[in-house]
Image (tube, rainbow, N blue to C red):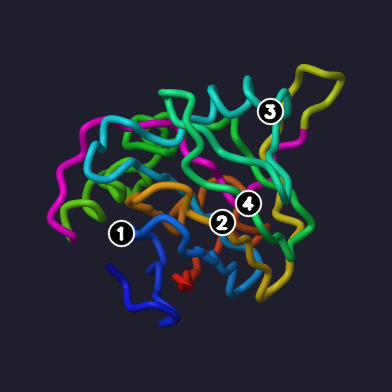
Amino acid sequence: MAHAETIQVIPARKGSAARMQAGQVLRVINTHGSQVVDFWAFNYPDLGECMSMEHTRGMLCKITPQVGDSLYTNQRRVILTMVEDTSPGVHDTLIASCDRYRYEQLGAKGFHDNCTDNLGHALAHIGLARVVHPAPFNLFMNIPIQNGNALSFAEPVGHAGDSVSFRAEMDCVVAFSACPQDMLPINGKDCQIHDAHYQILP
């Protein structure tokens, strides 16, 4: 488990993971203001129970959770509650994590860092094996919905130092990827990838 109150890095283009106890608070920091962070949470020790965007949307009847809302698992149990959001509140629950196939379709040649691999590597780094790969909660990602149906990949609207905080409602594992998408403007019009940070508070 990350030491309480110590700010941990989510390296640019890479992932990170940590264990949390029920009652602790996680703060995810958009350090540079333009970095999307793919975010996952899993019941510990049963990693087959995971934070689920499709179940959360159904339980909340919302596309995007807001402060005070709970996030639900694939067993419809509360795993986290959003307790603070200093950003404009623009996050995404619809888009799958990037993977090798996405970058191949976009024209990347050879290996490209991706959030799918980053999740597996982050869990392995703390001695855990990935059981499922759920859709992420894409923090700070701007996916406008137009005419009730059309989606687009837009630039982020946050600022350096924006953060989102969650209280753990069960013992869990949280994982992150500083999304390496540099072929679309989701990490800013210059497509630069930056570190992000997180902090676990008692």
Q: Does residue 31 appear to the left or right of 100 in the view shown?
A: right
Residues marked 4 and 2 touching at CB (< 8 Å): yes
Residue 85: image location, x then y, percent:
71, 60
Residues marked 3 and 2 touching at CB (< 8 Å): no
Q: Residues within 10 Å of mark 3 (few under 14, many from 20)?
A: some
Q: CA distance from mark 3 to mark 4?
A: 13 Å
Read off the magenta span: 126-144
Q: Residues within 10 Å of mark 1 (few under 14, many from 20)?
A: some
Q: CA distance from mark 1 to mark 3?
A: 26 Å
Q: Quadrant of residue 187?
A: bottom right
Residue type at mark 1: give it: Arg
- Residue 66 lies in the magenta stretch: no
Residue 19: mark in rendering: 1
Residue type at mark 3: give it: Leu
Q: Label the magenta part by its dominant secondary structure.
A: loop
**Residue occupied by mark 4:** 82
